[in-house]
């Protein structure tokens, strides 16, 4: 009975999470427009999405913005996490607390704050404003994940490497980075996902010359949920599913 209860409980949780996604994928094959009534099966919406050049320009913008922002945040966040773990300096506790403040700050507040900052700095809204904004809200997540992993490393390893003649650069690249690699990869995937699907902050700091996919989807949804929009979301879900499977395979292979 206990095992059956656990199975039913987990089954209900997964149904609650994935039934809406299954419905979205199913309606992406609906042969109608702006209607929730099933009118027949068709794959025309997938053909329309694949041939929509404006849509794929927005997808490409989101991809290289997410890659650029997550790479920069990964570099800065990893260095900050290692510094917070290994070194003692004035204001260390304050800096750590400010990182959690950024995480807990509502996106709308952060978006308006960044918009004011860019306006005062005369920074034109477009790629660079989105880039700096995404780097800003990704860095704290990298620091928290990598710092948690770094605290689990035996500090005697660093002392032994120093005794064997390793300088700080060698210590970082040959010991710290390999031991933090799982946390770094997890942070990279999280930052990419956060940057790729952010809409609240991006809405405030984006410009007309650089349209990203979340803003494009938001503008399409304001006219009504069409099967074309369901198709686009289904393709994004399959892309995410493939990335997660690859990450799981890489992790299991590394453990083996």
Image: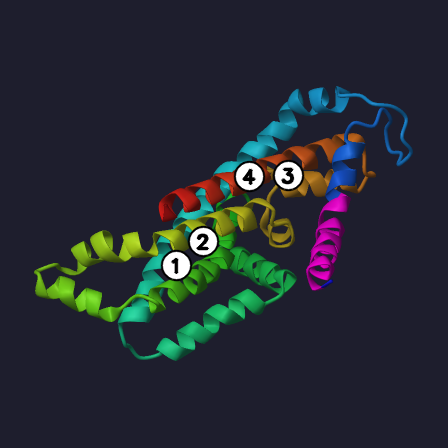
Other residues around mark 2 within 10 Å, as few (<14) / some (14–19) / many (≥20): many
Mark before the other along the chain sequence, 1 or 3: 1
Magenta stretch, main secondary structure, is helix
Answer with the quarter of the image where residue 40 lies. Answer: top right
Residue 123 makes an appearance in the image: no
Describe residue 209's horizontal placement relative to residue 12 as left or right.
left
Over which residues does the magenta segment extend? 2-20
Answer with the quarter of the image where residue 59 lies. Answer: top right
Mark before the other along the chain sequence, 2 or 1: 1
Question: Are circles 2 and 1 on residues that touch, CB within 8 Å?
Answer: yes
Nearer-the-camera pick, 141 or 64: 141
Question: Are circles 1 and 3 on residues that touch, CB within 8 Å?
Answer: no
Q: Which residue is mark 1?
A: 77
Q: Which residue is mark 2?
A: 187
Residue depth check, mark 4 versus mark 1: number of the one nearer the observer: 1
Q: Which residue is mark 3?
A: 237
């Amino acid at each position: 009975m206990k095992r059956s209860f656990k199975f039913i409980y987990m089954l209900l949780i997964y149904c609650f999470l994935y039934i809406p996604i299954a419905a979205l994928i199913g309606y992406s094959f609906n042969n109608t427009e702006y209607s929730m009534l099933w009118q027949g099966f068709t794959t025309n919406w997938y053909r329309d999405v694949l041939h929509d050049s404006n849509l794929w320009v927005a997808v490409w913008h989101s991809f290289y913005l997410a890659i650029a922002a997550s790479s920069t945040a990964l570099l800065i966040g990893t260095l900050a996490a290692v510094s917070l773990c290994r070194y003692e300096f004035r204001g260390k506790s304050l800096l750590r607390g400010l990182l959690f403040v950024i995480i807990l700050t509502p996106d709308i507040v952060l978006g308006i704050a960044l918009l004011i900052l860019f306006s005062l700095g005369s920074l034109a809204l477009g790629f660079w404003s989105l880039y700096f904004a995404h780097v800003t809200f990704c860095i704290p997540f990298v620091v928290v994940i990598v710092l948690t992993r770094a605290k689990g490393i035996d500090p005697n390893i660093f002392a032994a490497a120093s005794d064997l003649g390793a300088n700080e650069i060698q210590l970082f690249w040959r010991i710290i980075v390999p031991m933090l690699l799982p946390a770094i990869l997890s942070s990279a995937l999280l930052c990419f996902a956060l940057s790729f699907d952010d809409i609240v902050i991006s809405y405030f700091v984006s410009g007309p010359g650089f349209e990203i996919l979340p803003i494009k989807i938001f503008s399409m949804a304001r006219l009504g949920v069409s099967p074309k929009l369901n198709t686009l979301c289904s393709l994004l879900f399959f892309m995410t599913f493939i990335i997660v499977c690859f990450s799981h395979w890489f992790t299991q292979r590394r453990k083996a």
